[in-house]
């Protein structure tokens, strides 16, 4: 009886992927305990976030991909309406308008579009899989550009980049030619001076600081300087769990969220960093395997986008903390403290499991 219940509950859970996710969450809790100053309250809050996120993963994994395909357009339209609502009525906090109050619920619609955009584009190209043409890719680019621009206007550069990446991966996997990609890249390079003037002052400052953080060591460059000091002082094997001086003496800002990798690197050193990267590679490799063997175009495109977006999360955060990318608000996947981003990640990983374990897919 118990065995039947267990098999029923885990029928649509991919064992390999779930094992790597749980291991990453355990590592995250250990680092969070150190980074959060041994705060039990912070640990309890994150434990609740994890339970909610895992519940979302389980529910999503049990939804057949053909049902997800039917939900793609409604989710995208709802997300766009909510983004417009943020632009018109959103709450302003720290100079940004990103949140929307809906009665007793406070939501960040941009998080919805991290999943809504690749779902919509995968649905769109699945409908045109027989003869994808340039006009279809241009339409896809337009469907991607609208939410990206709305999120950039909030302003939220980090989230807009993640949404743009998730949509681009679908376009690329749907057959977007390298000639077109290089043409767009060249156009962006030519338009760079104009795009530079469109950035907010703090965004331009972050890019300037990337090349020389010591021009403002106590201001805009402080995050990068302290993070790189922490990573460098970790050496080969690290200072040991709970023994990182940069973290314990409160030098690293936002050390439980965006800069938690600096805490990890200081305490576990280069060897620990390599093991964490290996864990991420296992998750990414499994996701790409699921995408390669998906039984529908929708599943293949969506699984590929989700997997590569996960890679983008990790690459951007580690690059930001290491000082090779500008500072943007991107958490370290499955490690950083927070509920919203964790739920979004688990939603995507649940979709991967759904695509892997539901064998009979029906196009719609």
Image (cartoon, rainbow, N blue to C red):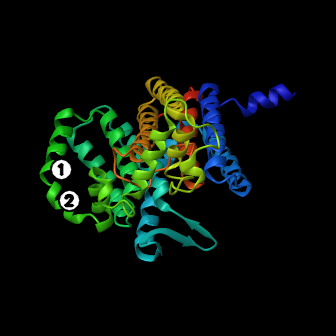
> What SS does tag 1 mark?
helix
Mark 1–mark 2 contact, CB under 8 Å?
yes
Residues 244 and 31: in front is 244
Residues 163 and 201: in front is 201
Instruction: Report the residue at 35% width, 49% height from top.
Output: 164
Q: Position of residue 361 (x, y in %)?
A: 52, 30
Q: Position of residue 123 (x, y in %)?
A: 41, 42
Instruction: Report the residue at 51% width, 48% height from top.
Output: 71
Does 14 sit left or right of 154 as displayed? right
Q: Quadrant of the N terminus?
A: top right
> What SS does tag 2 mark?
helix
Q: Which residue is mark 2?
A: 195
Which mark is drawn over residue 188?
A: 1
Does 254 sit left or right of 7 as displayed? left
Which mark is drawn over residue 137?
A: none
Q: Position of residue 77 (x, y in %)?
A: 43, 58
Does 273 sit left or right of 32 as displayed? left
Q: Residues within 10 Å of mark 2 (few under 14, many from 20)?
A: few
Q: Residues within 10 Å of mark 1 (few under 14, many from 20)?
A: few
Q: What residue occupies the far left of the structure in this picture?
A: 190
Q: What residue occupies the far right of the structure in this picture?
A: 1
């Amino acid at each position: 009886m118990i065995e039947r219940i267990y098999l029923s509950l885990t029928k649509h859970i991919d064992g390999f992927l779930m094992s790597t996710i749980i291991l990453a969450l355990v590592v995250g809790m250990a680092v969070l305990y150190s980074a959060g100053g041994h705060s039990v309250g912070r640990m309890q809050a994150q434990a609740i976030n994890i339970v909610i996120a895992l519940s979302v993963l389980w529910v999503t994994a049990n939804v057949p991909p053909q049902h997800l395909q039917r939900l793609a357009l409604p989710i995208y339209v709802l997300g766009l309406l909510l983004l417009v609502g943020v632009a018109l009525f959103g709450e302003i906090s720290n100079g940004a308008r990103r949140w929307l109050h809906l009665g007793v619920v406070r939501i960040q619609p941009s998080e919805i579009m991290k999943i809504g955009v690749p779902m919509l584009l995968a649905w769109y190209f699945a409908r045109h899989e027989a003869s994808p043409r340039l006009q279809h890719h241009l339409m896809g680019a337009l469907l991607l550009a609208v939410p990206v621009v709305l999120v950039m206007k909030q302003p939220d550069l980090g989230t807009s980049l993640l949404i743009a990446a998730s949509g681009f991966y679908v376009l690329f996997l749907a057959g977007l030619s390298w000639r077109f990609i290089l043409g767009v890249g060249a156009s962006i390079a030519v338009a760079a001076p104009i795009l530079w003037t469109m950035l907010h002052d703090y965004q331009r400052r972050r890019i300037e600081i990337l090349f020389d953080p010591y021009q403002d060591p106590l201001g805009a460059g402080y995050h990068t300087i302290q993070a790189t000091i922490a990573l460098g002082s970790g050496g080969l094997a690290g200072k040991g769990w709970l023994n990182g001086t940069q973290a314990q003496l409160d030098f690293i800002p936002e050390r439980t969220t965006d800069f938690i990798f600096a805490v990890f690197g200081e305490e576990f050193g280069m060897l620990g960093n390599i093991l964490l990267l290996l864990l991420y590679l296992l998750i990414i490799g499994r996701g790409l395997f699921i995408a390669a063997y998906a039984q529908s175009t929708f599943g293949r495109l969506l699984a590929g986008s989700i997997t590569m977006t996960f890679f983008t999360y990790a690459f951007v955060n580690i690059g930001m903390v290491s000082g090779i990318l500008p500072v943007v608000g991107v958490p370290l996947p499955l490690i950083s403290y927070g509920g919203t981003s964790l739920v979004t990640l688990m939603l995507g990983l649940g979709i991967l499991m759904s695509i892997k374990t539901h064998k009979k897919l029906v196009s719609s």
